[in-house]
């Protein structure tokens, strides 16, 4: 069963509009389950436009969920293979068109608020939690670009994207532009077309 179908089949939407799901994945021949949380605000735009959360999932591309599964199967610790993801909190997938330029509007955006690994502390993707990008996010970002899964990466610490003129921006998040300011509380991945 695909990652997308697993998430849809296991979806529970609460009265407060938050949602949870789960996905089963294999990591070094051991089957694990990852809880996926969607806070209510993660689909505010869609809900206010009359969409259900199932429609949000339906409108998110299969390859976006494949990338999420790739993240879950990524070997953060190649020496011991002990580090895998037990829970991930997402802040956005597909959302209705507003500007026409957001990859979320095309089902190719994945935003992460927090990752709970099997060992160690939570990785909180928020400028208020730490001044430096977590080493595991750096490994994940670099591997995702190398594998050509993603074309853009926005975070509270790092911005990597091509602007409308085709100019590559690869540097720190200086917290000055609007694009930088809206990415201070999550990590965004744009999935390759």
Image (spheres, rainbow, N blue to C red):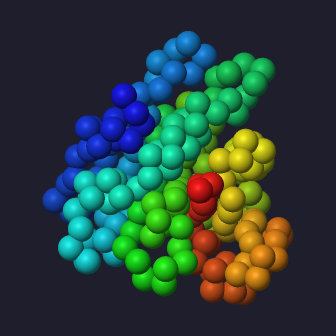
Residue at 72 percent of width and 86 percent of height:
176
Q: Give the percent coordinates (x, y) of residue 68.
A: 52, 43
Give the farthest residue toward the left.
15
Q: Give the percent coordinates (x, y) of residue 32.
A: 46, 23
Q: Give the percent coordinates (x, y) of residue 78.
A: 75, 24
> In the drawing, does residue 182 fall left or right of residue 17?
right
Work out which quarter of the rendered image holds the C terminus and state it.
bottom right
Work out which quarter of the rendered image holds the N terminus and state it.
top left
Give the farthest residue toward the top.
29
Q: Quadrant of residue 40?
A: bottom left
Residue at 69 percent of width and 59 percent of height:
151
Let me know if residue 71 appears in the view.
yes
Q: Quadrant of residue 153?
A: bottom right
Closest to the observer: 163 or 139?
163
> In the drawing, does residue 110 fall left or right of residue 54?
right
Closest to the observer: 105 or 141?
105
Residue at 44 percent of width and 46 percent of height:
62
Q: Relative to residue 131, is residue 66 depicted above or below? A: above
Q: Relative to residue 3, is residue 103 depicted above or below? A: below
Give the farthest residue toward the front.
193
Let me know if residue 135 appears in the view.
no
> In the drawing, does residue 177 fall left or right of residue 6?
right
Residue at 61 percent of width and 49 percent of height:
123
Q: Give the percent coordinates (x, y) of residue 82.
A: 64, 23
């Amino acid at each position: 069963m695909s990652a997308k179908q697993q998430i849809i089949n296991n979806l529970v939407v609460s009265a407060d509009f938050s949602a949870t799901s789960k996905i089963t994945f294999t990591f070094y021949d051991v089957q694990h389950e990852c809880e996926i949380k969607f806070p209510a605000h993660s689909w505010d735009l869609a809900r206010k436009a009359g969409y259900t959360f199932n429609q949000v999932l339906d409108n998110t591309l299969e390859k976006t969920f494949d990338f999420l599964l790739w993240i879950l199967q990524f070997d953060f610790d190649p020496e011991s293979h002990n580090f895998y993801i037990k829970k991930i909190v997402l802040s956005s997938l597909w959302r209705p068109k507003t500007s026409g330029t957001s990859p979320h509007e095309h089902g190719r955006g994945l935003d992460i608020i927090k990752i709970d690994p099997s060992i160690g502390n939570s990785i909180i993707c928020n400028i208020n939690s730490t001044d430096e990008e977590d080493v595991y996010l750096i490994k994940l970002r670099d591997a995702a670009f190398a594998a050509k899964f993603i074309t853009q990466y926005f975070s509270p610490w790092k911005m990597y994207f091509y602007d409308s003129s085709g100019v590559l921006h690869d540097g720190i998040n200086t917290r000055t532009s609007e694009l930088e300011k809206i990415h201070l509380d999550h990590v965004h991945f744009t999935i390759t077309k």
